[in-house]
Amino acid sequence: MGNSSRARSHPFQPTYTDSQLSQYLHSFSFNYQDTFPHGFALDYTELKTIQQHHLSTYPFENLSLHYSTTHTISLDADALFEKFVTADRGRGGYCMENNAFFGTMLRTMGYAVTSVGARVCNAINGGDDETFGGWSHMVNIVTIADGKYMVDVGFGSHGATAPLRLEENTIQEQIAPGEMRLLRSNIKQSTDASQLLWLYQVRETRDAEWETQYCFAETEFLPPDYAMMNFWTSQSRTSIFTQTIMMAKMILEDGKVVGAVTMFNGKVKRKVGDVVEERCCTTEEDRLEILREWFGVRLTGEEERGIKDLVTELKKDEVL
């Protein structure tokens, strides 16, 4: 398909087959060949289109750490393809799953993709708004003809909804009226003021304060780096991912991200513009119904039973 063959020369980075790429593209709500009849353009318009359709098709979610028998996360390329595409049960994954899968698809299409690590701002979890945790997030840097872009499909409802060029203070729409940008700065914890990182920031409206979500460098991270990161984030008792169920899926209308549906334990919200609909799940039956109806996620009976006796299990008249 298109220019995908040129992406397969690096022995240490996985790619998918043309058949797998075709299955992935056919999972979207548009006909790729009609939209891009001359093959892969490898440009900003195409990259943005693929990113937004991915965000509205494959949710950010950590269900495998709660609704499964193993409570583990695999970053193996074939395992991710099986989970996202082949199984066809509405599943996605958390940051490293989504961005590893998406980056591999882009590489298969012919894009130049560099995967880098990121530090999440502690303010997101109620901590110091000027400090950051360790390397726990993954983003992709994609190089096209007019420059380098940060592309992230694994950060939930505050994540980037379009490629962000690696340049300072270029403000783009996130989910209207929200905006997003990148800044280049040293961070408070660093002992070397000359070490600069990219800061990804969002704000709810044009008049609101900017809120830093994470920072990242341009140093390439390799699969063994993510194996170590993934082990901690998926297994540590102090990781938010093992103690909380979280999901986010963007809502795409007429080629534009207009809202998101989110879940945090038993609390679910769908927001499009000023219209907000909320639900509160009090039992596992409630939450499983919401997963099916609001997110399109269909778990197996074995997966549903996997949450029994975990801290995240919802019991009657109990809301986490």
Image (cartoon, rainbow, N blue to C red):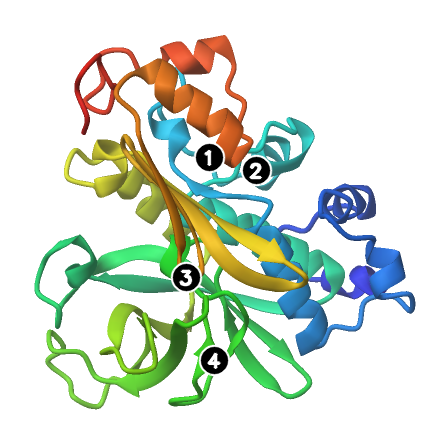
Question: Looking at the image, can residue 275 be seen?
Answer: yes
Q: Quadrant of residue 279?
A: top left
List the residue tagged with mark 1. Answer: 74
List the residue tagged with mark 3. Answer: 159
Nearer to us in this view, 301 or 286: 286
Residue 187 at x, y percent in the picture: 18, 78
Task: Compute the Cα span from label 4 to label 1.
Answer: 33 Å
> Of the residues tagged 2 and 3, which is closer to the observer?
3
Task: Compute the Cα span from label 2 to label 1.
Answer: 7 Å
**Marked residue nearer the N-terminal end (2 or 3):** 2
Q: Which amino acid, by three-letter code, is at mark 3? A: Gly
Q: Note whether 153 is above or below 84 in the view shown.
A: below
Looking at the rendered structure, which numbered label has been put on residue 289?
A: none
List the residue tagged with mark 4. Answer: 172
In the image, what residue occupies the spot 63% across and 31% down?
A: 82
Q: Quadrant of residue 263?
A: top left
In the image, what residue occupies the spot 79% across and 73% down?
A: 41
Position of residue 76 in the picture relative to residue 211 (left or right): right
Q: Which amino acid, by three-letter code, is at mark 2? A: Leu
Q: Note whether 51 is above or below 144 in the view shown.
A: above
Do residues under tags 2 and 1 come within 8 Å of each other at their CB atoms?
yes
> Of the residues tagged 3 and 4, which is closer to the observer?
4
Task: Compute the Cα span from label 2 to label 4.
Answer: 30 Å
Residue 158 at x, y percent in the picture: 37, 60
Task: Compute the Cα span from label 3 to label 1.
Answer: 22 Å
| SS at circle 2 | helix
Position of residue 200 in the picture relative to residue 235 (left or right): right
Question: Looking at the image, can residue 12 be seen?
Answer: no
Nearer to us in this view, 278 or 260: 278
List the residue tagged with mark 2. Answer: 80
